[in-house]
Image (cartoon, rainbow, N blue to C red):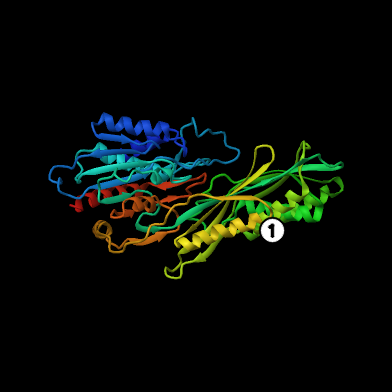
Amino acid sequence: MNSILSNLQPAAVWRFFGELMNIPRPSKHEERVSAYLQEFGHKHGYETLADEVGNVLIRKPAAPGYENAPGVCLQAHMDMVCEKNGDTNFDFMTDAIKAEIEEGWLIARDTTLGADDGIGVAAALAILDDHRIEHGPLECLFTVDEETGLTGAANLHKDWLKSSILLNFDDEDEGEFCIGCAGGIDTVAELDFTREPVPAGMKAFELKVYGLTGGHSGDDIHRGRANANKLLNRMLWNATHRLDARLATIDGGNLRNAIAREARAVILVPTQNADRLKRTAYDYSQQMVFEFRSTEPGLQVSLSPVETPDYVIDLDTHRNLVAALYACAHGVLAMSREIPNFVETSTNLASVKMVGDNTIRICTSQRSSVASAKQAAAEKIEATFRLIGARVEHSDGYPGWTPNPESRVLKVGVETYKRLYGHEPVVRAIHAGLECGLIGEKYPQMDMISYGPTLRGVHAPGEKIEIRTVQMFWDLTLEILKNLK
């Protein structure tokens, strides 16, 4: 067991979480953690199933006296978001996650921690491992690829689950029950360019925006955090139109469900404009630091001379790209008219990458609790990039989860929470996507809630989990399982 976790409670949950920290599990590369879960199930003599996409289902018989209790499925996803700081030497395909304890939190400084949703997986394993726990017939469903496409839940067989109740362990705030979520869709644009020789008399620089907070493109989209792609492009726009800059390369953001934290571009300007570019970059840096002073304390903009590249992007494509990126919406598009302070519709300019020899790919994602608004948001982004001749495609998307305030398991959860902690929990829907939407589509009679301990900074380096809330989450889960009888 990881030594820094050895004294934490509940011991079994932290023991399994420590084991997961040592198993690489990027989205779409869950083979090792899937094998670990299957080995665990077989070792304990439980019925253990795996489907063709890698989902794992482990069934545990009811505790004595609970044979007639309703069947309950504990559900968590086995993959994790793999983000690291640009100057961090770390390989998510081979290296174990490193973390430390700071003021009551377990935190990974330079990478993501994987508490989303490793802590849910660990809790389910701890329940499977302990024969003293009181519960009815139990199923533990561990899904793959939640973070980059929800493909595990999307490909779940309609006849796999026997349970009538599902406890999803993928919420990030202790003291709340989630009963609904937004649906989502990805919109990807591709723009071809021609490589042209570098004009004579040009000087090359790398422009970089970094040190941003980033975060989850659903949970954090309303917090006013900067998007590195948008900030970089503002500078590119000005350099293009005022300093005759030419663009050679661009690389910003990474994951579809993360707000871009870093972005960079190599640009060239006529040698006589080099000093003006330096002054402009400095002024721009000061403006951005002031503009985002309350939400981005670590924001930095740098401009560094680099070797002259082999080519530049043709000028028409260059100008069209910076125009479209400037016009491309990012952030909250609409607030709910029914639920106070609840984001209804949003879009995230996730990444701008050069792929192959002559293509620029722009990845975006749209979310909404209203299906028609989700589609309209995706079409708005599509229209922006079609205006410059880009090819645009949409993913299949995933459905939202319609709240059921009369849910039986919700009532049990709320009453249990009040008895344990002496106050009402928060009941809400969230703007992020949850697998509950897809599971509910396949099992429309399934009674579901989502909850968990407190996590912060998910989908970004510095992800952390509040240690005391893991014990609260554990105690609450055991009491809910007992009270559902």
Look at mark 1 in the image and give the residue it sits on.
287
* Quarter of the rendering containing residue 176: bottom left
Q: Name which residue type carries label 1.
A: Gln
Closest to the observer, 387 or 80: 387
Give how far across and how far down residue 209 sits, in percent. Answer: 65, 48
At 45% from the left and 33% from the top, the residue drawn is 24
**Quarter assignment of residue 250:** top right
Q: Is residue 296 left or right of residue 107?
A: right
Q: Residues within 10 Å of mark 1 (few under 14, many from 20)?
A: few
Q: Residue at x 50, y 40 (%)?
A: 82
Task: Identify the residue at the far left of this view.
Answer: 65
In the displayed structure, would residue 217 be above or below residue 92? below
Left or right placement of residue 402 versus residue 457 in this view:
left
Relative depth, front residue between 194 and 234 = 194
Q: Where is residue 107? Give x, y as percent.
A: 46, 43
Q: Between 118 and 352, which is closer to the camera in this rendering?
A: 352
Count of numbered badges drawn on the protein: 1
**Quadrant containing the N terminus in the rendered view:** top left
Q: Is residue 329 visible?
A: yes
For residue 118, above or below residue 341: above
Residue 294 appears in the rendering: no
51 vs 227: above or below: above
